[in-house]
Image: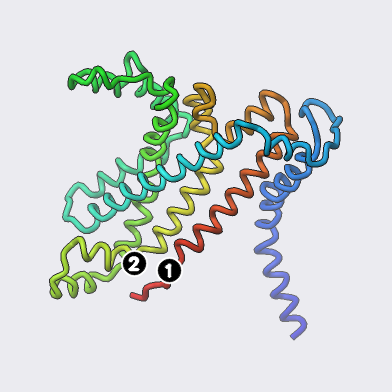
């Protein structure tokens, strides 16, 4: 009995040990170190650190740019969730429920942006939004809507909304495939029974498809929220660098600016802790709001 317990412990340690080691090195240590640095004033260029206690957090709460960065991040969260989920669900249903011969081809087309680097996507959309020769303004001029043309990434009102389209375009394919997997796992007999009962396709979608694939929908929404709050700064840095006049500054890009451009690593670490807390709080709220009883097939 003792030998059996020891063997189980050794087996679990052998399986989980490498994973825990990698997690500790890549995730846990940077997290703890970031919290530690947030209590210091440090340029990042020397070994000298000055302990300032909660001064960085006091500065955080008094920084006039911080509320704007939070608003911009959550604007991107809401618009990306709505845009990606609506389009991904539509295409997933269309490619599984409708008899489209070219469905395999469309799967590849929609998924293609997901294999592209974010850097390439940002540069590509910079050209698309170019006010002189970009596809957007050229297209508007071609159909006689010259008055609608804008310097999209240079306009205070349009710069932030302009970041939504490339983000949605790049994210549809992955979540479309995830939802397609859920839809294809629903027994066809359920839809056949609904047809016999006279349910319309719209009723079948809301009363059968959505409840059956709710776990996939829930995971997709939470994943989009997490990746946006923690990764939206990449597309911002590439396309606008937070401009014009901080109109596209998000928490991550502001952290990068403070730490790696202004060399305020302590303050940057405090911003990082704020991002962590907001991300955890947002996910916790979503877990409660999106909770549903599992539908048995």
Count of all numbered marks drawn on residues in the image: 2
215 or 81, which lies in front? 81
Residue topped by disc 2: 211
| Residue 284 position in % (x across, y down) | 56, 58
The crowding category of the residue bearing disc 2, from other C-alpha atoms within 10 Å (few below 14, some 14 to 19, many at least 20), is: some
Can you give x and y, in whole percent of width and height, for residue 176 in the image?
Answer: 34, 51
Tell whether label 2 touches label 1 (CB within 8 Å): yes
Q: Residue at x 72, y 26 (%)?
A: 263
Where the N terminus falls, by quadrant?
A: bottom right
Residue 60 or 98: which is nearer the viewer? Answer: 60
Quadrant location of residue 233? top right
Depth order, front residue of 134/285: 285
Q: Quadrant of residue 139?
A: top left
Say left or right for 8 vs 136. Answer: right
Where in the figure is residue 227, as x and y percent of width and height?
51, 45
Q: Which mark is residue 292?
A: 1
């Amino acid at each position: 009995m003792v030998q059996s317990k020891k063997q189980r412990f050794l087996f679990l340690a052998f399986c989980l040990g490498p994973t825990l080691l990698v997690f500790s090195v890549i995730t846990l240590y940077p997290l703890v170190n970031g919290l530690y640095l947030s209590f210091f004033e440090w340029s990042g260029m020397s070994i000298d650190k000055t302990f300032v206690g909660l001064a960085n957090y006091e500065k955080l709460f008094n920084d006039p740019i911080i509320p704007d960065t939070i608003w911009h991040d959550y604007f991107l969260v809401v618009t990306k969730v709505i845009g990606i989920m609506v389009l991904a669900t539509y295409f997933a249903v269309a490619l599984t429920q409708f008899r489209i011969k070219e469905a395999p081809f469309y799967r590849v087309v929609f998924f293609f942006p997901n294999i592209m680097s974010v850097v390439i996507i940002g540069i590509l959309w910079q050209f698309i939004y170019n006010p002189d020769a970009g596809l957007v303004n050229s297209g508007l001029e071609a159909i006689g809507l010259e008055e609608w043309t804008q310097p999209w990434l240079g306009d205070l009102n349009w710069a932030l909304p302009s970041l939504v389209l490339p983000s949605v375009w790049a994210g549809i394919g992955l979540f479309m495939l995830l939802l397609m997997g859920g839809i294809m796992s629903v027994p066809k007999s359920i839809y056949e029974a609904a047809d016999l009962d006279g349910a319309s396709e719209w009723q079948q979608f809301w009363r059968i498809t959505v409840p059956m694939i709710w776990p996939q929908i829930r995971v997709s929404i939470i994943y989009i929220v997490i990746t946006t709050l923690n990764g939206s700064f990449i597309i911002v840095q590439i396309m606008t660098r937070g401009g014009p006049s901080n109109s596209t500054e998000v928490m991550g890009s502001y952290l990068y600016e403070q730490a790696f451009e202004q060399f305020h690593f302590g303050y940057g670490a405090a911003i990082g802790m704020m991002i962590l807390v907001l991300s955890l709080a947002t996910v916790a709220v979503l877990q409660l709001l999106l909770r549903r009883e599992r539908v048995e097939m």
